[in-house]
Amino acid sequence: MHYPKARQSLMSLAVASACAAAAAQVYAQEAPAKAADAPADVQSVVVTGLRASLFSSMNLKRNSDGIVDGIVAEDIGKFPDTNLAESLQRISGVSIDRNIGEGQKITVRGVGPDFNMVLLNGRQMPTSNLGDLNGRAFDFANLASEAISQIQVYKTSRAETPTGGIGATLNVMTARPFDRPGLHASIGAKGVYDTSNDKLPHDIQANRSLTPEVSGIYSNTFANNTFGVALTGSYQERNLGFNNAAVSNGWKGPFRGDENSWGVIPQGPSDSCPACVITNRPTGGNLYSVPQNLNYNFNGVKRQRTNAQLTLQYKPVDTLVTTLDYTYSENKLQTKRNDISAWFNFGPSSSAWTSGSPSSPLVYKEFVSNSDIAMGAADFATKTQNKSLGFNAVWKPSSTLRMELDAHHSTAVSGADSPFGSSNTLGTASFSRGNTTADFSHDFPVLSIEGADFVGKPQQVTGSVFTNSYMKGEVEQLQAKGAWKVLEASEVKFGLNYTKVDNRSAFSNNQRDTWGGATKPSDYPSSLWHPDTLRQYFDKIDGSGNPNLFNQFYTFNFAQVRQVVANASGQPNLYMPKNYFDNDARTEEKSKALYLQFNTDWDTRLPIHTSVGVRYEKTDVVSTALVPSATKISWVSQNEFPITFGDPTFTTLTGRYHNLLPSFDSDIELTSDQKLRFSYGETIGRPRYDQIQGGTTLNSLVRTDGGTGSAGNPALKPVKSKNFDLSYEWYYGKQNFVSLGLFKKNLENYAGQSRVFATPFNLHTPVGGALWNEAIASACANTDTTCIRNYIFKNHPTAPGVTPPGVNGDVNGTIVGQPSDPVAQFQITSFSNQKKASLNGAELNLQHMFGESGFGVSTNYTFVHSGLRYDNNAVGEQFALVGLSNSYNVIGIYEDKKWTGRLAYNWRGQFLSSTFDGSGPNPQYVEPYGQVDVSLTYAYNEKLSFQLEGINVTNQIQRVHSRTQQQLESVTQGGPRYMIGARYKF
């Protein structure tokens, strides 16, 4: 907290420093951050409208140590957006990744979701997401906004802040009764109309597009404000859809123009293929890629989200406040899908290409006959539950000392919520596909198929996959914090933290690879297949009107057809998910931390406030994984030594690391309304769970020189970032400000792949054993494995482990490694800290209210740059920063006593989302995307109000491409959604 009237001289500062050293020996732990103190100040403002919310957010920024932004609720139970991520994207430097039309994950200042830490009331939250079983990113789709009072975004580090956020640390704060003494209560109801559900095939469409949302909050204090209760709850349903055209298995290549290998295009017409005309063929070293497939899929989703929180507060004496809270959230998703696709076989073809390198096909045509027109379906459901039980006690024994103890146990669990698993695919096909063409010249890829005959070659079930996935995150955390005001204008903050994070990721696949047909076509009555056309589902995407589009396909009811094929095959167990996991990885991280932070004001001509701190943290990692257990190596042919595997077993690896993290914040009051800030701090972001997985998995085939395998590395160090920030802020009116911030991050210890030699499972190999050496001594060359094998079979046919050819049905003969033989060496691919990167950027903010007119504007622009970019004209794996993009927001508001209106436009520039696609090392770029949202509120009186909201009202599409814009990865059409509701305050 700042003390503008009392500034420290250098002598008093020295005395304060000595006192701080003494305090560190007596007291333990962390005091609330400057911005954490701010809520009390923020809450003192009467927050009753959108302008007041912006005013409170501005003061949060102005009064904080370091660079902090935030969003404050307009009123109790009334956050600006229905989705927290949608609100966060309004903050400069924050971009979001969308899923099913909603914000799900965040990127801050170009740093991806795995490296941003999310706290709930200052506590680290666990994560679970079946879409990424190995990630650490928090899924904001699980939390409704009704119980949230504010979100604080710490963009610079402080010693008291828990580690894990390189881009930012976000503190999501919920309503507590002592923050607003007295009775506060409200209820709200909305009807949500999602237009995207109307654009779906009947088999996957929900029976209604209008769904309910209800919410309520009750907060009250009793017994002269010594006891408080707050209860919030919300239930939301949403029925939606999205339609997607994609090269879902990625792009094969890239190939050199002069390369000759499987997958390359013909050189041109030939006697064997006179129709193989190649226009503008890539030549020499120019790179090009060819599509693996082209797929159109249609997805219907039902979502039910339940949130609740109970908070009890008790103040037995004025100096002690205790809080007990329990938070629960549940997010249930049911997904149905139909699709149609064609797979390319890289046989005879004709094509036309863009110029330059890399080159992409404008048109790609393969000459085939009687191939499959694949049509699939899916029907699965998932459920994610978050639970958090916490206790907090704040004791103020004097006006200068504040002590706090906080403990919580929190879990996040995601898994299947359907008898058909967490994901599945049931394939069908008509084997009547002739020559097949893909046109990539527009945003929409156009598939053309010749010779289709659904009558003569009717649809039948082919292959299938049923997946059962599970993820559980668990956090136990104990924080002891203290803050001691020394002299008149200084404060020492100190603390101890203990955090235990457990993560479990598991899955199994039940796959049947009968892609040529699971049973007979006659097993499936024609009534199972429902004809439809696909152009209508992509009418907003440029190119979908192409008359060459193969416009017909068949949908079907997944459950019906699954039952038919289960009966017809006589193997119903193959058409259900397994009830056990084939892959199971578990990680435990125990961290202990202590910190010391010293804040003071300096006696200089321009008032200066500084905060200097250091945090020490040590983490122990134990990682266990279920892996196939290798039992022996058998020599079965000239150069093949396959491994025999037994039942899977759990293997465990360990690691340890520690970090000393300094931080420094300063701000100079240039005038009463202008500030200049400088910050330096070091932060860490922990590795992904697959990078620290404990088990070693061996590849099944060994050679004479040994084998290969893969493993995680629990000893990986976290990514470390050295962060520099410089910011200028001018608060030129009660609700107006402009700011310019510059930042730079130097990052190191990114994980890259490395190879080490090891002897897992102590497997013995015949290579170099007694019989092998005897054969060499008898004139066999060391490289002549045929001679060596024949010698052993001839001279030692009954030796242990030797089975000569023709014995017991063994055609080639087998030689098994014996305990006296050497232990085989394996080259294990693992991860090591070897990559570095740097990024820099700028943030510009402007908030201006036009006097008493009721009109105002809030806008910001973020620029992020890094020299480490993906090279589209290179082959193989690359390291590049994902999520790096520019962005801006423009928000116009109007507010008077009756009406509140907001028009918001959010834009995010192109960014790299992944360095792999379905085929291998290929970039995926999300193209620029801008979205318009509107809201309008009418206050009928002080208690009753009505709301109208629109999300994505201009119905924008999302498109992803690879090395060039013509190399489509996916393009998705959803639709706007509208909400109308009412809210009543008691």
Image: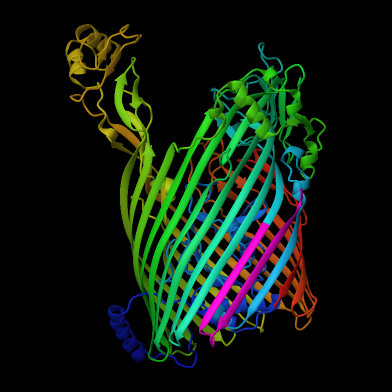
Against 985, residue 823 (above or below) is above
User: Is 699 or 359 nearer to us in this picture?
Assistant: 699
Q: Would residue 352 be counted in the magenta stretch?
A: no
Q: Position of residue 685 (x, y in %)?
A: 43, 58
- Quick check: can you spot residue 548? yes
- Quick check: can you spot residue 287? no
Position of 831 with respect to 33 (left or right) is left
Q: Position of residue 951 (x, y in %)?
A: 73, 58
Highlighted range, magenta: 208-236
Give the color scheme: rainbow, by chain, secondary structure or one colour.
rainbow
Against 119, residue 882 (above or below) is above
Residue at figure coordinates x 59%, y 21% from the top left: 569
Is the magenta region chiefly helix, strand or loop? strand
> Residue 284's quadrant in the figure?
top right
Position of 234 with respect to 540 (left or right) is left
Q: Position of residue 281 (x, y in %)?
A: 65, 27
> Residue 702's quadrant in the figure?
top left
Residue at figure coordinates x 48%, y 90% from the top left: 605
> Residue 109's quadrant in the figure?
bottom right
| Quarter of the C terminus within the rendering | bottom right
Q: How many marks?
A: 0
